[in-house]
Structures are given as C-alpha cells and as structure tokens.
Image (cartoon, helix red, strand yellow):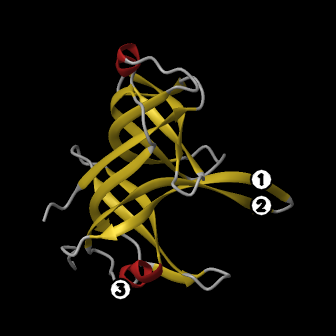
C-alpha cells in the first residue's frame, strides 16, 4: 500500500479577499477564508493558501463560489500567538464553481502518537489521532484527526507506527483557551474521519 497520500478538494464561498500569507523560497503566497457548508447547516471556515499565479488565472472575490484541489498542510507556529500547530489548505488548482458545497480528502500516513479514546459529556465515544503524512521533498505534515462512535473504537486499537489510510473532511471548530486570567476564543482545524481503509496496516 502507498505509505503517503494527501489529496483534498473543497467547494465553497470566499469569505474575504486574499491577503499576504508568507514567503517561501522566494515565492510569496496569499490566503483567503473559504466557507464550506456541511449537510447539517454548520459552516467550516477554512484557510486556503494560493500562489499569485493561481489568482491571476482565477481572481477571488468575497461572496463568490470557488472549487479547489490541493492538500492539507501544517506548520509550527513559534510566534507565541495563537495555536502552535497551524493547519491550512494548499491549493494546486482554483476555479469558479456552482452547486453544492463539497469537502473531501484522502490521507495515507503514519500514526505518530498514541490514539486517545474518550467520551463526550453525552456519552459518545471519540478518538483523537495525529497522522504524519510525508511530502515529496522530505518534510511531513502532522495532521490532527478525530473519529466518532464505532470508528473511534477501531482507531483506538491502532499503534504508533501503523500506516493508516482514511477518508474524511477538513473542519474548523471554535473553542475557548484559558491562560491564567485571560480567556480567548480560538479556532482549531482537524480532519473528521469518515472511513478507515481495511488495508490500514500495523508497523
């Protein structure tokens, strides 16, 4: 089985104009929020990173619908402000879109932390995973994943080093962070696991 795969696609509504994100190896990148509705009516607000070249081919305007294919990326935030692990969507293609919103991804990587199975206050089982997905040039993206119900129980039997193949969606979740006397609202990004491939193999 392929030991590394990171393929994702989104279709949604631009929430703001693109703004400068960062520069890497002399190339500047921009980012804009894409609002993707779930079937439940909830909305995931996902940060899409794009190159100026893509924006020249497909300018982004707030309120308009777009679809993009790319991959989920992570990097460590050492600024001391906000989340330590930053999750974004790196766009390989970008085009105008119509129709229902869409949010799909397929990942193959290695489990790099023991899965944690717990229960919500309402008694539903949930499992937290951290998946390392290698890029082509030596780096890896560390992606937090979450599974529910019977799938959470299956994920709880995985071990560090297992190769895991999953499908799911990228989602955003608001939470409150308390540090001393200060409390602030933050947004966490994680992969909601929809299925676990039966070819998932132990290390």
Q: How many badges with numbers are in the image? A: 3
Q: Secondary structure at mark 2?
A: strand
Tags 3 and 1 in contact by the CB under 8 Å rule?
A: no
**Quick one: label 3 or label 1, which is nearer the N terminus?**
3
What separation in Å lies between label 3 and label 1 (alpha carbons)?
35 Å
* Crowding near the residue tagged with mark 1, few <14, some 14–19, many ≥20 C-alpha atoms within 10 Å: few
Q: Name the disc covering residue 179, or none.
A: 2
Q: CA distance from mark 1 to mark 2?
A: 8 Å
The extreme left residue here reads 1
Residue 169 appears in the figure: yes
Give the residue furthest to the right. Answer: 181
- The reply to whether dot 1 and dot 2 touch (C-beta < 8 Å) is yes
Location of the C terminus by quadrant is: bottom left
User: In screen coordinates, is 120 left or right of 86?
Assistant: right
The residue that label 3 is drawn on is 157
Crowding around mark 2 (Cα neighbors within 10 Å: few <14, some 14 to 19, many 20+) is few
Q: Which tag, 1 or 2, sits closer to the chain's start?
A: 2
Left or right for 157, reference 42? left
Q: In which image quadrant can residue 182 be found?
A: bottom right
Left or right: 116 with respect to 8? right
Q: Nearer the viewer, mark 3 or mark 2?
A: 3
The reply to whether residue 111 is in sight is no
Residue 78: mark in rendering: none
Q: Residue at x 59, y 32 (%)?
A: 15
Which residue is rendered at x = 68% and y = 52% of the image?
A: 186
Q: Position of residue 112 (x, y in %)?
A: 36, 69
């Amino acid at each position: 089985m392929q030991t590394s795969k990171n393929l994702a696609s989104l279709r949604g509504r631009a929430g703001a104009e693109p703004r400068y994100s960062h520069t890497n190896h002399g190339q500047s990148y921009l980012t804009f929020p894409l609002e993707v509705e779930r079937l439940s009516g909830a909305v995931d607000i996902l940060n899409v990173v794009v190159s100026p070249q893509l924006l020249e081919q497909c300018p982004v305007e707030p309120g308009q619908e777009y679809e993009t294919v790319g991959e989920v990326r992570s990097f460590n935030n050492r600024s001391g402000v906000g989340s330590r692990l930053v999750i974004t969507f790196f766009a390989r293609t970008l085009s105008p879109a119509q129709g229902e919103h869409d949010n799909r991804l397929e990942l193959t990587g290695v489990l790099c932390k023991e899965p944690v199975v717990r229960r919500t206050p309402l008694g539903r089982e949930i499992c937290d995973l951290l998946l390392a997905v290698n890029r082509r040039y030596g780096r890896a993206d560390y992606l937090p994943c979450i599974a529910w119900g019977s799938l959470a129980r299956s994920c709880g039997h995985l071990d560090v080093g297992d190769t895991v193949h999953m499908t799911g969606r990228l989602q955003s979740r608001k939470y409150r962070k308390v540090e001393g006397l200060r409390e602030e609202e933050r947004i966490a990004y994680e992969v909601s696991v929809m299925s676990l491939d039966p070819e998932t193999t132990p290390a």
